């Protein structure tokens, strides 16, 4: 069908003002906030391909009509909410349409009996959190992108927040969900505390990255605001000792909402006045009902001191609480200086995570010319293992191609090393288009389960083509 006719159809469903065709806006919507694109834009990168239009959806009835049409006409479509993705998951091929759900932004119900909140896909997490706080509740979900991310995108990328040890990732918070398949079928998974009625279908949507359909509504848990908080920091002379401290704390059954270990480079950069040369820093925050935080805080302190960690009081936590979401400014600053900078978060079992950290830092320093910095921290821990959030910055020739080469080399080292130790190539940013090349190795013999799921839900292959699974 001709592009003009396609636009006309959408205008008949949504009205002219909600079908956006302005080139400058299409350009803005042509990518996400991946560090690679930030520096490439600085070197003159412009999207080669633009969507035909952006559809500003307001109701599920509209979304159903749109889905039926794109499926019939086989139009590649990119669902989108906050636009804060960081894996090239929002890039728009020519003749595609963006299904923008950010204006479906109603908080439908705060249920104080069941402790849940139901919200449309486009509700910004920050708005939801502020609304809940006024009533004495919290989502417990604080990704660094809190000011940008929206509920649909958080579920679609399997996001995690900084207080995850206590509250869990979005997969632990999701109670029920509604979405529309490419066929136009509206599917609703009702709210229950737990069930054993076959596979957990919520997990089809969790991490789906727009590849199976659009999420329209989610119900997540809420928590009563904590009445007490204990914050404490420690300096530690060895990264592997820091990992052992966190392992011992979580394996003993404690769940400090924040449990972070920053390596010596990050410690010197962000907590210079507190640490000595070559010391890393550990940040712990316990919260909960009266009495709990103090009890947990004492247990944390006991383990930390046993490993020779040096107590630093609560000040470093106070600084972290103020600056914890500054990452975008840092990446922007690097990009403006012409540096290739980004973050890459992986996870592995306790038996392997230290080896991955050591090997990545050593290899990057040895192999990447003009490296400015490579650092890592553990910020989300479990009884079985933890994540490492690597941050890197390297200079390169001021061209789009040189930036790509340096970026690929840095990411390649991190991912290859992670796979070597059977770790996962993505702890919480998702796959997007950038990490698809490693998905066969990531999933191993389970890979056909993903391709078959994709085919079952999206037989025409129109939903965010090229994410999760490489596009031939
Ligand atoms: C500075 C910064 C810090 C970040 N920190 C964190 C962090 O701490 N933790 C973390 O987990 N992530 C983090 N991220 C990544 C990002 O914020 C998350 O992936 C977030 O969940 C994306 O939500 P969004 O609403 O912006 O989604 P978008 O960017 O709009 O979309 C992301 C993906 O989800 C799909 N999608 C979006 N909405 C829907 C929908 N309604 N139905 C179906 N598919 C949909 C899109 O097609 C795309 O593939 C960070 C990003 C930035 C830029």
Image (cartoon, rainbow, N blue to C red):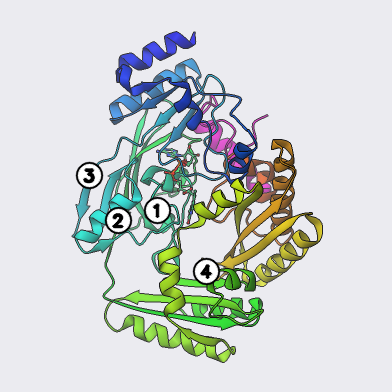
Q: Earlier in the sequence, mark 3 or mark 2?
A: 3
Report, in whole angstroms, how far the alpha carbon at label 4 lies from the one at label 3.
33 Å
Q: Is 204 located above or below residue 60 in the figure? A: below
Left or right of 44: which side holds 112? left
Q: Which one is in front in this view, the residue at disc 3 or the one at disc 2? A: 2
Element under label 1?
loop
Q: Which of marks 1 and 4 is nearer the N terminus?
A: 1
Q: Mark 2 points at which residue?
A: 129
Secondary structure state at the residue bearing disc 2: helix
Magenta stretch, residue numbers: 443-472
Question: Mark 2–mark 1 contact, CB under 8 Å?
Answer: yes
- Front residue of this view, candidates 9 and 455: 9
Please report the residue visible at 60 percent of the width from the left and 54 percent of the height from the top: 343
Q: How far across and down, in percent of the image, does residue 32 sit?
A: 52, 39
Q: How crowded is mark 3: few (under 14 residues within 10 Å), some or many (20 or more)?
A: few
Q: Is mark 2 within 8 Å of ligand 1?
A: no
Local packing at callout 2 (Cα closer than 10 Å; few below 14, some 14-19, many 20+) is some
Q: Mark 1 points at which residue?
A: 146
């Amino acid at each position: 069908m001709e592009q003009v006719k396609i636009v006309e159809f959408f205008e008949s469903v949504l009205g002219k003002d909600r079908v956006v065709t302005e080139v400058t806006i299409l350009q803005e919507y042509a990518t996400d906030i991946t560090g690679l694109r930030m520096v490439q834009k600085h070197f003159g990168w412009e999207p080669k391909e633009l969507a035909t239009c952006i559809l500003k959806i307001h109701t599920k009835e509209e979304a159903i009509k749109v889905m039926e049409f794109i499926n019939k006409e086989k139009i590649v479509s990119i669902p989108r909410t906050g636009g804060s993705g960081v894996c090239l998951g929002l890039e728009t091929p020519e003749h595609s349409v963006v299904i923008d759900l950010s204006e479906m932004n109603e908080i439908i119900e705060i249920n104080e009996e069941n402790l849940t909140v139901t919200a449309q896909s486009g509700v910004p997490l920050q708005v939801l959190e502020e609304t809940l706080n006024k009533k004495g509740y919290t989502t417990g979900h604080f990704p660094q992108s809190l000011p940008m991310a929206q509920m649909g995108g958080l579920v679609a990328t399997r996001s995690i927040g900084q207080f995850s040890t206590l509250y869990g990732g979005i997969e632990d918070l999701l109670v029920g969900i509604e979405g529309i398949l490419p066929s136009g079928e509206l599917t609703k998974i009702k709210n229950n505390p737990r069930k054993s009625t076959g596979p957990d279908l919520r997990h089809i949507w969790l991490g789906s990255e727009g590849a199976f359909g659009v999420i329209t509504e989610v119900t997540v848990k809420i928590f009563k605001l904590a009445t007490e908080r204990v914050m404490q920091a420690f300096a530690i002379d060895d990264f592997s000792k820091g990992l052992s401290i966190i392992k011992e704390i979580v394996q003993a059954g404690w769940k400090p909402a924040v449990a972070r270990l920053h390596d010596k480079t990050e410690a010197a950069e962000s907590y210079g006045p507190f640490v000595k040369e070559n010391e890393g820093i550990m940040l712990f925050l316990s919260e909960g009902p009266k009495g709990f935080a103090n009890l947990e805080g004492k247990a944390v302190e006991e383990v930390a001191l046993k490993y020779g960690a040096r107590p630093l009081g609560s000040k470093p936590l106070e600084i972290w609480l103020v600056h914890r979401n500054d990452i975008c400014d840092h990446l922007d600053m690097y990009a403006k200086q012409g540096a290739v900078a980004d973050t890459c978060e992986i996870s592995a079992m306790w038996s392997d995570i230290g080896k991955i950290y050591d090997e990545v830092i050593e290899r990057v320093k040895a192999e990447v010319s003009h490296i400015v910095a490579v650092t890592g921290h553990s910020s989300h821990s479990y009884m079985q293992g933890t994540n490492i959030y690597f941050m890197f910055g390297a200079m390169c020739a001021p061209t789009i191609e040189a930036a790509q080469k340096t970026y690929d080399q840095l990411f390649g080292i991190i991912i290859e090393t992670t796979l070597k130790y059977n770790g996962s190539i993505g702890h919480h940013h998702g796959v997007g288009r950038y990490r698809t090349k490693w998905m066969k190795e990531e999933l191993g013999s389970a890979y056909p389960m993903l391709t078959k799921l994709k085919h079952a839900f999206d037989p025409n292959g129109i939903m965010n083509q090229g994410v999760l699974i490489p596009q031939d």
